[in-house]
Amino acid sequence: MAASADTTTITTTPSCTLTGRIALVTGGGSGIGRACCQVLAREGARLMVTDINLQAAKHTLTLLPGGQQHVALAMDVRDRRSVDDVMKSAHDQCGAPPSLLVNCAGVFITSPILKIDDDSWQKNIDVNLMGLFLVTQAFARSLLESGIDSKGAIVNIASIMGKTGLTEFSGYSASKGGVISLTKTCAAELASKAIRVNCVLPGVIDTPMSANASEMRENFKRLIPLDRFGRPEEVAEVVAFLLSERSSYMVGACVEVTGGYAM
């Protein structure tokens, strides 16, 4: 089943639940991150689209309603200075720090445990877990230090593999398991500061990243009760819900979006 970065169909009827909010999305240049940007913009948010590939982030801007209010920025989530620079730019360009965050930047490197090399293992951890930590810390500090009386919300994109594990996915599964654990710890610490933290556990979603594991996808599909792969917008709609006040009593939740896999 072929994947495409630009086939996402976003429901165009807005409920405007995020009007006036500034949302920062990492990995916003493709896949689930791009779909999150589209859905959040539809809901009225002003987007800070970040990606290590600036051109991809700029392309996402062309797909968003709201014209010039949105901004694309290059960010390497593994680099604290890059992350801090983006937070400063967000504040400078918008007049306020972002109060919504979607941690979606990720990599997908697979290998059997007996064959995975140190660099591949470390890259999974550096991008998927360390990067999420750096961005979350910078985001929370920026919002709390601003003195603005604003509620914050963070949604981390983990993976069902972080819960179940999977053959040949040791580094990826470990990093996403770490995301689940870190989500719960941050949720416990930040709830009293009016920042809610939750995460989403997607199954196999039709994105350019998952397309690189075609054999795995076909084996996985047989285990999905809905008998199909997910679409990026189906994850993005859950993300928008978790960022909005419609989920105001959800803290530390890990919502599975898997088509029924691993129920």
Image (cartoon, grey):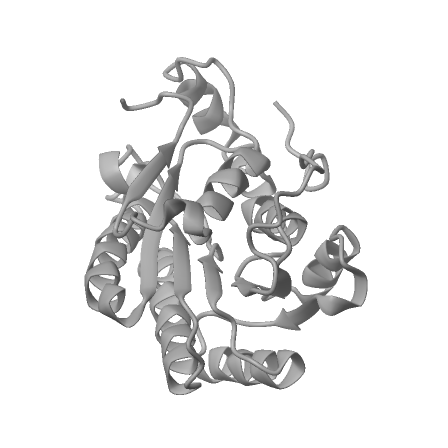
- The quadrant of the image that shows the C terminus is top left
- The quadrant of the image that shows the N terminus is top right
Q: Quadrant of residue 89?
A: bottom right
Residue 144 visible to an observer of this rendering: yes
User: Residue at position x 59%, y 66% from top?
Assistant: 52
Q: Position of residue 20 (x, y in %)?
A: 60, 65
Tell me if residue 4 comes above or below residue 19 in the rendering.
Answer: above
- The residue nearer to you, when weighing 109 against 38, is 38
- The residue nearer to you, when weighing 108 against 74, is 74
**Is 250 positioned to the left or the right of 9 in the image?**
left
User: Residue at position x 27%, y 56% from top?
Assistant: 183
Residue 211 visible to an observer of this rendering: no
Q: Quadrant of residue 47?
A: bottom right
Q: Position of residue 136 (x, y in %)?
A: 37, 69
User: Residue at position x 71%, y 34% from top?
Assistant: 7
Tell me if residue 91 comes above or below residue 136 in the rendering.
Answer: below
Q: Position of residue 162 (x, y in %)?
A: 28, 43
Q: Position of residue 190 (x, y in %)?
A: 26, 68
Q: Quadrant of residue 154?
A: bottom left
User: Residue at position x 46%, y 44% from top?
Assistant: 241
Total numbered labels: 0
Tell me if residue 224 comes above or below residue 103 in the rendering.
Answer: above
**Is 192 positioned to the left or the right of 10 in the image?**
left
